[in-house]
Amino acid sequence: RGSGNDQQPLAGLNALITAGPTQEPLDPVRYITNHSTGKMGYALAQAAKALGAAVTLVSGPVALPEPTGVNVVQVLSAEDMFEAVQRRFASADIAVMAAAVGDFQPEHADAEKIKKQGRADLTVRLVSNPDILVWLGAHQRTDGSQALCGFAMETEDLIHNAAKKLLAKRCDMLVANDLREPGAGFATDTNVVTILTPAGNGKGSSGGENNGGADDDGADDNGVLNQQVH
Ligand code: CTP
Ligand code: CA
């Protein structure tokens, strides 16, 4: 698809990329977030643009300059990001979900600042956020003309956990990060990733490592091809 050439292989294609953390408000002055800096998603947006794609970057709050020539949509909460992505997915040929989306939000965001006086402790109940990537996987074009790439951040059992996400979220590709790997993790200029693709999709059928391990959780490790990328 598209009108790509050697210099601009993504010419004629729309890329939708998410980046950064989300902010889940507790009250008008406080929120829950994570360590994401947005570097990965912003670098991908820049790269996709350089390869000729028309790029929309849906970004949580980060301290990075907007990449030139990219349509940047700023959001705060996971729900806002979900809405922004939902609205743009139908016209996206490539969707790359690099954002570190908050999995939970406070059940109630107080309208006024929560005061400490008279409290020895504070309990906040969190409720789950929508999973944007799951929604995308379930609403892909039926003709296979959309490519869906997810990410996974893990601190243990990288391949096993990432393979489960690849299948559960129906991605064409999943980029697995091990937070503990030297040169990887948040706020680094480098990363160490393993790229997983579903077996049998013809997108690379040799050299896949077999990470073994028979189990019964539906993540068939043998059904996933992967290659190390540094
Ligand atoms: N993701 C998303 N919406 C969410 C949570 C995650 O779209 N509410 C996307 C991320 O952008 C990433 C992928 O799903 O591409 C995996 O995110 P990750 O946090 O690693 O996995 P989760 O499925 O949220 O599972 P957990 O955090 O429990 O490991
Ligand atoms: Ca998560």
Image (spheres, rainbow, N blue to C red):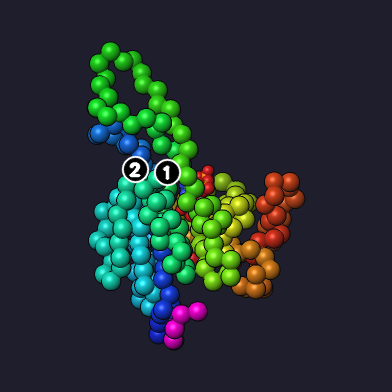
Instruction: Looking at the image, tell me whether mark 2 or mark 1 is earlier in sequence order.
Output: 2
Residue 211: image location, x then y, percent: 68, 57
Label 2: few (<14), some (14–19) or many (≥20) C-alpha neighbours in 10 Å: many
Is 42 above or below relative to 178?
Answer: below
Residue 113: image location, x then y, percent: 24, 27
217 or 194: nearer the eye? Answer: 217
Q: Is residue 190 visible?
A: no
In 3D space, how far apart are the residues under numbered discs 2 and 1 (Cα atoms)? 7 Å
Residue at horizontal 54 percent and vertical 58 percent from the top: 139
**In this rendering, would 219 be left or right of 166?**
right
Chief secondary structure of the magenta portion? loop
Quarter where residue 117 is shown: top left
Q: Which mark is residue 102?
A: 1
The answer as to whether callout 1 falls within 8 Å of ligand 1 is yes
Residue named by callout 2: 23
Residue at horizontal 66 percent and vertical 61 percent from the top: 224
Q: Residue furthest bottom?
A: 6
Q: Which mark is residue 53?
A: none
Range drawn in magenta: 1-5
